[in-house]
Image (cartoon, coloured by chain):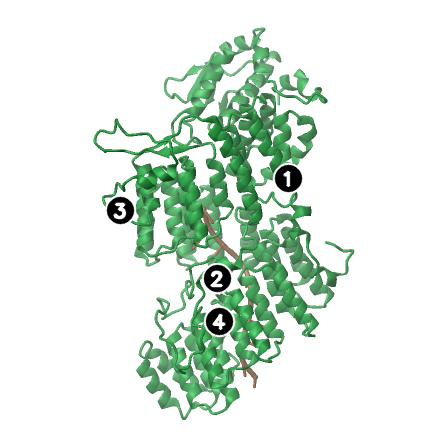
Chain colours: A green, B brown
Amino acid sequence: MASTTPPHCSITSTTPYHNHNQNHHQNHWSSHKVSLGASSPSTRNASKPGNSSTLSRDPTFPPLSPLPPSTSELGPDFRGRRSTRFVSKMHFGRLKTAMGSRHSSVAEEALQQAIRFAGDDNALESVLLSFETKLSRSEDYTFLLRELGNRGECSMAIRCFEFAVRRERKRNEQGKLTSAMISILGRLGRVDLAKSVFETANFEGYGNTVYAFSALISAYGRSGFCEEAIKVFESMKECGLKPNLVTYNAVIDACGKGGVEFNQAVKIFDEMVAKGVQPDRITFNSLLAVCSRGGLWQEAMNMFNEMAYRGIDRDIFTYNTLLDAVCKGGQMDLAYEVMSEMSEKNVLPNVVTYSTVIDGYAKDGRLDEALNLFNEMKIIGIGLDRVSYNTLLSIYAKLGRFEEALGVCKEMETSGIKKDAVTYNALLGGYGKLGKYDELKKLFEEMKAECFSPNVLTYSTLIDAYSKGGLYKEAMEFFRQFKQAGLKADVVLYSALIDALCKNGLVESAASLLDEMTREGIRPNIVTYNSIIDAFGRSATAKFEADATDGTNGTHSECSTYMVIDRTESMLGHIEEDNQVIKIFGQLAAEKVLPLKEDSDRKSQEILCILVLFHKMHELEIKPNVVTFSAILNACSRCNSFEDASILLEELRLFDNQVYGVAQGLLMGCREEVWVQAQSLFDEVKRMDSSTASAFYNALTDILWHFGQKRGAQLVVLEGKRRHVWENAWCDSCLDLHLMSTGAAQAMVHAWLLDIRSIVFEGYELPKLLSILTGWGKHSKVAGDGTLRRAIEALLRGIGAPFRVAKSNIGRFVSTGAVVAAWLKESGTLKVLILHDDRTNPESTTFGELPDLQILPF
DNA sequence: CGATACTTAA
């Protein structure tokens, strides 16, 4: 890694990652689904706490309600804010203990009494009074505060603090209590209260210390309010206080939690060095955390190297955070390397290390490797914790390996770890994927019965699952429950809704939802964009029923979908404001959405919209992934203009030459030129999970087939077969096409028949019965609509292949080996089986024209 | 003197 520059330079230099002009060709092919990137801080801070910024004149504290629901014990969900995923790093598992603190045993006694009166503030007051003479020093009170905080007794802690401050004479002792209190409130996620404690202390004259400021900075950081943290940091300097190591560390840490740009954190780091404050391990660990947020693995490696240069030890946190950055950056091979080096550096990987790398593999689609690491963990005796169990569970759920997922649940139970909201949501996702709606409902009820209130993700999962299954009525019902619960929609929920609309061709409604979410300050991500891109070329409209009397006379309006929906009276009896979504879902449920009639002008326009979207994504630093690529190719396949499709791909090459260059090259018939590049693309896809990989091959084959590059399509399909993209798709007696798109399937039929032919010509016998399976159109929008079956039927008829529909199964075409062999021996057969490209590169005709290649068995 | 650190669900 940049070994030519001295490491101490590397930290502040502009990194290639941020230099889009130079580097955007390399970094766009990220396989992980969500890029946290650098989100705009302004939107994230839409709901700043405690905006009553005027200094409180009243030395009493603000009313304590609303308190977090459960204050009696420290549950896993114990935090003040639960609305955002940016603030996931709250460390209530690692409590500050009073071990080694210099409190007296009387303080312990006082604590026991106080806990007994939990919730009764007056009783607490009398306990404190009765101990007043015995509790001498502020250490005793700090101990009490901390222990009350650890037990979630926020209001008691504040009472105790007020009491202690009142009886204390010495300023610096009051100051100690203040910084402790701010820290505790910060840990409890109550920045609003922390701020008012701070302001009061300042007003009363004992809060103007570097400790109080540092604690407040950290409190803001914990809740993700990085801008506020930096403001406090600046105001501290204005007060004439000098930030010290801890202060700087707290600010940098806040940057990491708030998802701030790496460069801004580096600026603070530079300032600290310039002021002569020597960074320590925690500084670097926090800087690494900033990198990990944005997946800036190169910068993280630089930091890591710089630590060695400065002679700073690296601990388990250093390694875990570095690994997180490297994993989020999609560099799993490097992650593996780093992890392997840990033991020889005497830092043994722990459960967090494993969870991090395992999740990295899982997100990269390398599920086998993820599962291997779990085994490794078991072998070397690292016990699984809640997080690792949930990670394992979600991998199985994602793979649809439900038996194993349930096994994980059992194992969790026997190890004494109860299911939590994460577990339930992962299970719901798993059932949803398999379309097990009864179980889904049952589990949802169980979850509620176990008092895990469903959160946004729960509802997103349910809405997504039901709409993917076409069950819009249920999806709508869950949406309504979600609204009723008063939850705020997030990017996942919006994406689920948008996806449902897109899959039904309601692009314009989807676009208006995209606007709506943006207006609400919710940043769309790659999943959102992939759905919308996928919708282009699917135009449909909701059908407007003038008078719902007979339905024969529904006027089919051609104007914009959004307008149609807007003018449609709610069929729910009453019109709910704000509920565009419910209306549209109502339409979907009533099957009043019809495809718009073929309109090639419109489709061409839509294709070009993709370019606009792509630019927008680039602007928002949302990295396209393989799903984006597949979606774009699918949109092209739905469009009839070769010119438009090729213009689009040509333009997209500016963003990622490798990926779009390969597609464009194959489409234009320059196969020879791009085939090496194509191979490395296929290598990358090979590492992803099977459904993503097959979607990629399906999309690429479809566009080639659609635009007449049939030989190219066939080569791609064979590449996919060689790499086992479609499981057990092919043997001598049976060709299973049910996971393939129509283009891929057709190209495959030709290849398979050619292969069978070579068996015949080598003098071997064919199996008695040959069959071609098309399934029931699993991959088309409506299960069982048979698009694939019809395409294959037409193809077989077209080439005169003697197959017929099986009696028992209309998705299966059968023939006998003898009949097929006879047909294959006919003189004209080879000619119809060999595929050709409409376009070949005139300068390199040799490659595509060698018939030998096609006759040989593959 | 008191204030600062890691991993999970689409």
Residue A1 appears left or right of A787: right
Residue behind mark 2: A45
| Dot label at residue A575 | 3
Q: Amino acid at mark 3?
A: Ile
In the displayed orientation, state which residue is furthest to the top.
Answer: A827
Residue A857, by quadrant, is top right
Count residues near mark 4 (Cα–Cα under 10 Å), then give few for <14, some for 14-19, many for 20+. few
- In-front residue for pair A331/A220: A220
1 or 3: tag closer to the N-terminus:
3
Q: Position of residue A521 (x, y in %)?
A: 46, 55
In the displayed orientation, state which residue is furthest to the left.
Answer: A549
Same chain, marks 3 and 2? Answer: yes
Q: Amino acid at mark 2?
A: Asn
3 or 2: tag closer to the N-terminus:
2
Residue behind mark 4: A95
Count residues near mark 2 (Cα–Cα under 10 Å), then give few for <14, some for 14-19, many for 20+. some
Same chain, marks 4 and 3? Answer: yes
- The answer to whether A791 is drawn above or below residue A299 in the figure is above
Q: Amino acid at mark 1?
A: Leu
CA distance separating discs 4 and 3: 50 Å
